[in-house]
Amino acid sequence: METSNVNAEIITIGDEILIGQIIDTNSAWIAQQLNLIGINVSQISSISDNKQHIINSLDLASLRAELIIVTGGLGPTKDDITKQTIAEYFHGKLIRNEQVLKHVTQLLESRNVKMNELNNNQADVPDNCEVIPNNHGTAPGMWFHKENAIYVFLPGVPFEMKGIMADYLIPRFKKQFDTPAIYHKTLMLQGIPESTLALLIESWENQLPATIKLAYLPSPGIIRLRLTAKGDTIENLTQLVAQEVEKVNPIILPFYFSDIDEPIEVTLSTLLTLNKITISTAESCTGGKIASLITAIPGSSMFYKGSIVAYANQIKTKLLKIDEDIIDKNGAVSQQVVELMAKNARKILESDYSIAISGISGPEGGSADKPIGTTWIAVASEKQVLSKKFIFGDNRERNIQRASISALNELRKMILQDLKTYEKK
């Protein structure tokens, strides 16, 4: 074992990242995997395909971290200069590795691709590196040990990088580094602003043990409350975190929907599947977003009947059977209309429950009485229809996201209440 406290730095190479052409998802994924095995990520950097930038970044990283992971720049084209640069940096020279060449040749033949000189170049690696096999692509990984730091170079193609990490590196890191045990617990909340939540649980948070760190991770409509504990054994950490969760649960109960880091549509789908409940949706302002979230879940056909996207008023009248006079009198964004949407959609689509939503997503269309972000959500069962008014804000994209998530949660709460009532009987 080399050390008990390992700091890692992640460097991504590629002009395409710096100009915003692609998003660096590699660093986030690597950081998650390292964190799970107790390796602390101290810095993440993105740099250009430039020899001096690469050298400077490696020099600086070696001052901060014992483990440096670099992705990108290992392709066969002229703009990928990383291999030549790192060969010089580690005082080696590029040689053709016959084992890598054999792998590249077999892989391309299996894909019915003819080898060319650029493909052959993929087998060129520094003569003083340890080659890390790439079972998922042509560019091998490379491992260097210099002074007090380990350097790992990986291809930038995400599925190739993930394959090398999973197949070789994570198991090796576990054996090589004596890291502390780490345990995460994420509580999923919906329907409360971050600042309000912070005040609500302030007393509990102030009394958390020093070994537990709390993080607020907000996104439109959702807050992930993550507890992270580090210590001697997973068993002790799990027990310690469970005790703290038990203390905070009564405080956050009105907003809590899962203790698994998962989207609310997944939580709802589990509830529907276990209880053999079917649902349907009637959407206006969200334009099918709720249906999209639901049907992205494998097996959703077991509980989801379908949707009526009634964006125009005449569709609300024609397909959802809502009287024109009711829409004219109350407006499409109203309690009366959204309740009828939910009630009629449930009957038309023959489901146990339904969701309906109508609102003003923006950026235009608001008024003094109904500002942008005004949204009515209704959920219906055979016995009742419940509705609620929300005002989300002035950003169209966030409004649609928040409205969709809020609608799914309103349905979840209705179903849970109905199940509890049934159990009491």
Image (spheres, rainbow, N blue to C red):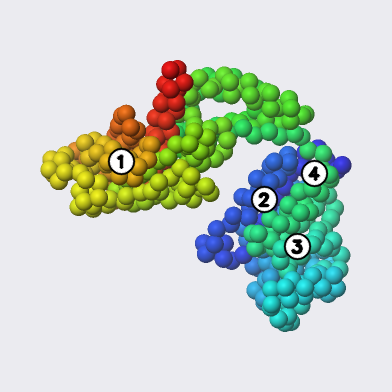
Left or right: where 423 falls relative to 146 = left
Sequence-first disc among 4 and 2: 2
Q: CA distance from mark 2 to mark 3?
A: 18 Å
Q: CA distance from mark 4 to mark 3?
A: 21 Å
Residue 347 badge: 1
Q: CA distance from mark 4 to mark 2?
A: 14 Å
Circle 2 residues within 10 Å: few <14, some 14–19, many ≥20: some
Residue type, numbered disc 2: Ile
Residue type, numbered disc 3: Asn
Secondary element at image label 4: helix
Does the residue at mark 2 contact the one at mark 3 (Cβ under 8 Å)? no
Residue type, numbered disc 4: Lys
Query: Is 299 in front, or is 165?
Result: 299
Where is the N terminus found, in terms of image quarters? top right
Sequence-first disc among 4 and 3: 3
Left or right: where 208 falls relative to 252 = right
Q: CA distance from mark 4 to mark 1?
A: 56 Å
Q: Is residue 406 visible?
A: no
Does the residue at mark 4 contact the one at mark 1 (Cβ under 8 Å)? no
Q: Is residue 381 above or below residue 175?
A: above
- Residue 325: x and y in percent read 12, 43
Residue 174 badge: 4
Q: Which residue is mark 2?
A: 30
Query: Is 37 in front, or is 273?
Result: 273
The quarter holding residue 280 reads: top left
- Residue 286: x and y in percent read 34, 48
Sequence-first disc among 3 and 1: 3
Residue 135 badge: 3
Residue 215 badge: none
